[in-house]
């Protein structure tokens, strides 16, 4: 049973007589922070008392009076200023746990009204380096897709790849001028990616070289300004402090930019072949832009090249998805929407939403200074136009009820304007959300870079995770008291599961909105909040069944009795019964870390149970059976829970 939802429902009924709109108060029924006060707590009496001008303790008493939870809870207690504490009845917990044994959904009731949820995630720009940010989107999006599906929603996982951007102009430019035909024949993706990076680097070189004199002047100016401020401060003028702080930060930023540019310019000039290319192609950026424009306007030659490049690039991405066990229902890239863009702008202007501003077509959103540009003055459509066309397509053709976008926090402004425009355009009934996430930082606390900064780098990152996991698996197996148990093939498979699971979990267990620091050691630690810890817990339970020759199916009959005499047994049963809540909360908040938090807590509770209560050695037969049943459920919850995060478990580790 989805316990929290059930309790909220009971409170809803009890509140009906006491206030106008119970829903705002039912959300205040929550899992208790501290087990001392019970399993759940309702904090609604205080705000309700305030709203109705009554004493909150009296409100709480009236609420308890109206509340019908007899078969579920011990008599509710009112504490402090009006907290209502609820303790789930042990007999209810035991019978519900025994019911879970034969339930493949582990007590979770599917949603009553299913929605069609389109989740836009991963969405890398093809042929451009796919970086860890895209990995983050991929992993979070995949977890949410699995959770919503499990809840009973219809989910369409759509990889909205950037397959129409300016990177193709660069590749075409590179292909025409610097192609190594042999390398292209041998490994086309690698060669295309080299071409992209080469052209991008030469273009960047010219940009930086051109910008340097201006930047140096500006830096000198700011330094002078700072010196004046600092003299004033030294002479006692404290009022200049905050301005000095600002200028100091600007100086630091500018010096970094200048130093970065100088290093890069010097590096290109020191490399004979790069310097030669740079000298011969001073206008490579303009030339690439021209190639992109030709592609977009239907030039047959560039179109043919695009059609040649695209499948190879997609195949490359596919190999990463396959390794990570990720599948999309659709991969509709930006190019898919190109034929629809003119019509989007037409429709927006007809509805009076878009208007001409200095030659560009813009949507002005109230309270927002920057306009949402849907067509630039040169006639080109934008990222925004494509996203609007995508919304129309997802609503009209896919009949989506909800659209989620698992995209980097830096695009927050774009999505705010997009959703607001869509609402005005006629999609007020569609639910939109930007499932935003922070940056992955390296050990130096700067944005994490894979070694070569490209897809190959991303693959080598996965390889490294598996290599490191392999060392842990070897060490663990070699150290077993009765000698190693795993053969070479099993060790390799376990390492793959642990390594990839580690990478995914490291990403998922952070609050997605915060930046987090990438750390191999933390990620693969065998104790603590890691996938490895849970995978070991799971394998340990399966080991109990193996050693005891236990028939797991046999434990799952309706008549199995669960005994909860020991507090550790009760705590475990309570944790197991919270699984449904955890799944629903993860979906409601669209936060996989709610589920990881639940699993970690459950793994800890399991570990206490396993330390306090004998299982195989227990002599009392019914107690032994009950404990084995608790073990069976725990393993299934870990498997199912990790499975919803896209993480696998192993029979033996
Ligand atoms: N391709 C974009 C990028 O790499 C992300 C696209 C996200 N999805 C969307 N519908 N805008 O930044």
Image (cartoon, helix red, strand yellow):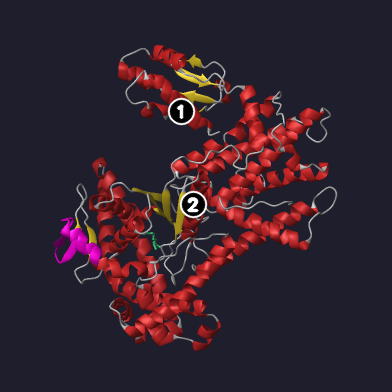
Question: Where residue 280 sits: x, y (%)?
Answer: 35, 87
Decide if residue 636 is on the left or right side of residue 26. Answer: right
Seen from the viewer's position, the closer of residues 377 and 101 is: 101
Mark 1 close to ligand 1, CB under 8 Å: no
Asked if residue 559 is positioned above or below residue 129 in the image, the reply reads above
- In the rendered image, which quarter is residue 270 located in? bottom left
How far is disc 1 from disc 2 in space, using C-alphas?
26 Å
Question: Where residue 292 sits: x, y (%)?
Answer: 32, 77
Mark 2 close to ligand 1, CB under 8 Å: no
Q: Earlier in the sequence, mark 1 or mark 2?
A: 1
- Judge the density around disc 2: few (<14), some (14-19), many (≥20) Cα neighbours within 10 Å: many
Q: Which region of the structure is painted magenta?
A: 343-362
Seen from the viewer's position, the closer of residues 53 and 369 is: 53
Residue 445 visible in the displayed image: no
Q: Secondary structure at mark 2?
A: helix
Q: Which residue is mark 2?
A: 145
Residue 8: image tag = 1
Q: Secondary structure at mark 1?
A: helix
Question: Where in the image, quadrant-wise, is ligand 1 located?
Answer: bottom left
Asked if residue 527 is positioned above or below residue 415 in the image, the reply reads above
């Amino acid at each position: 049973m989805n316990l929290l939802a059930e309790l909220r429902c009971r409170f809803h009924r009890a509140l009906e007589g006491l206030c106008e709109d119970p829903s705002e108060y039912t959300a205040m029924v929550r899992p208790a922070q501290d087990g001392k006060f019970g399993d759940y707590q309702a904090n609604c009496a205080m705000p309700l008392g305030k709203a109705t001008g009554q004493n909150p303790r009296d409100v709480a008493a009236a609420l308890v009076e109206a509340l019908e939870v007899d078969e579920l809870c011990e008599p509710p207690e009112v504490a402090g200023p009006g907290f209502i504490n609820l303790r789930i009845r042990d007999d209810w917990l035991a019978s519900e746990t025994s019911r879970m044994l034969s339930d493949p959904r582990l007590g979770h009731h599917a949603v009553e009204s299913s929605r069609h949820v389109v989740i836009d995630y991963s969405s890398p720009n093809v042929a451009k380096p796919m970086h860890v940010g895209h990995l983050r989107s991929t992993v979070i999006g995949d977890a949410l897709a699995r959770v919503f599906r499990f809840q009973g929603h219809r989910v369409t996982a759509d990889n909205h790849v950037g397959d129409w951007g300016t990177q193709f102009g660069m590749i075409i430019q590179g292909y025409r001028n610097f192609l190594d035909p042999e390398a292209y024949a041998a490994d086309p993706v690698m060669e295309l990616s080299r071409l992209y990076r080469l052209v991008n680097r030469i273009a960047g070189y010219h940009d930086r070289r051109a910008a340097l004199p201006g930047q140096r002047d500006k830096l000198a100016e700011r330094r002078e300004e700072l010196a004046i401020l600092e003299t004033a401060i030294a002479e006692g003028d404290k009022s200049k402090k905050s301005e000095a702080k600002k200028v100091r930060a600007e100086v630091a930023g500018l010096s970094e930019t200048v130093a970065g540019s100088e290093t890069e310019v010097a590096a290109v000039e020191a490399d004979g072949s790069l310097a030669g290319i740079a000298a011969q192609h001073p206008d490579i950026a303009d030339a690439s832009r021209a190639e992109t424009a030709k592609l977009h306007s239907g030039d047959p030659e560039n179109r043919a090249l695009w059609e040649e490049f695209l499948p190879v690039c997609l195949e490359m991405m596919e190999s990463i998805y396959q390794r990570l066990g990720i599948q999309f229902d659709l991969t509709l890239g930006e190019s898919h929407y190109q034929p629809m863009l003119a019509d989007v702008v037409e429709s927006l202007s007809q509805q009076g939403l878009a208007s001409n501003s200095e030659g560009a077509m813009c949507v002005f959103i109230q309270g927002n200074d920057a306009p949402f540009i849907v067509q630039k003055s040169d006639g080109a459509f934008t990222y925004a136009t494509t996203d609007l066309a995508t919304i129309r397509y997802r609503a009209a053709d896919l009949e989506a009820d909800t659209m989620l976008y698992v995209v980097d926090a830096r695009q927050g402004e774009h999505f705010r304007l997009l959703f607001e425009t869509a609402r005005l355009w006629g999609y007020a009934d569609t639910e939109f959300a930007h499932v935003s996430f922070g940056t992955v930082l390296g050990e130096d606390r700067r944005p994490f870079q894979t070694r070569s900064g490209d897809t190959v780098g991303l693959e080598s990152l996965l390889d490294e995770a598996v290599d490191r996991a392999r060392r842990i698996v070897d060490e663990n197996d070699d150290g077993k008291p009765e000698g190693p148990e795993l053969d070479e093939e099993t060790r390799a498979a376990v390492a793959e599961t642990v390594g990839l699971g580690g990478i995914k979990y490291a990403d998922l267990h952070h609050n997605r909105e915060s930046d987090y620091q990438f750390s191999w050691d933390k990620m693969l630690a065998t104790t603590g909040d890691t996938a490895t810890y849970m995978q070991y817990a799971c394998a340990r339970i399966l080991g109990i069944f193996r050693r005891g020759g236990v028939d797991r199916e046999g434990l799952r009959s309706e008549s199995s009795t669960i005994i909860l005499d020991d507090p550790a047994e009760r705590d475990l049963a309570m944790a197991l019964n919270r699984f449904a809540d955890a799944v629903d909360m993860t979906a409601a908040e669209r936060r996989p870390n709610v589920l990881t938090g639940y699993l970690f807590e459950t793994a800890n509770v399991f570990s206490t149970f396993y330390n306090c209560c004998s299982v195989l050695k227990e002599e009392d037969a019914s107690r032994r059976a009950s404990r084995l049943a608790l073990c069976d459920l725990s393993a299934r919850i870990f498997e199912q829970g990790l499975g919803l995060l896209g993480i696998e478990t192993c029979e033996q580790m």
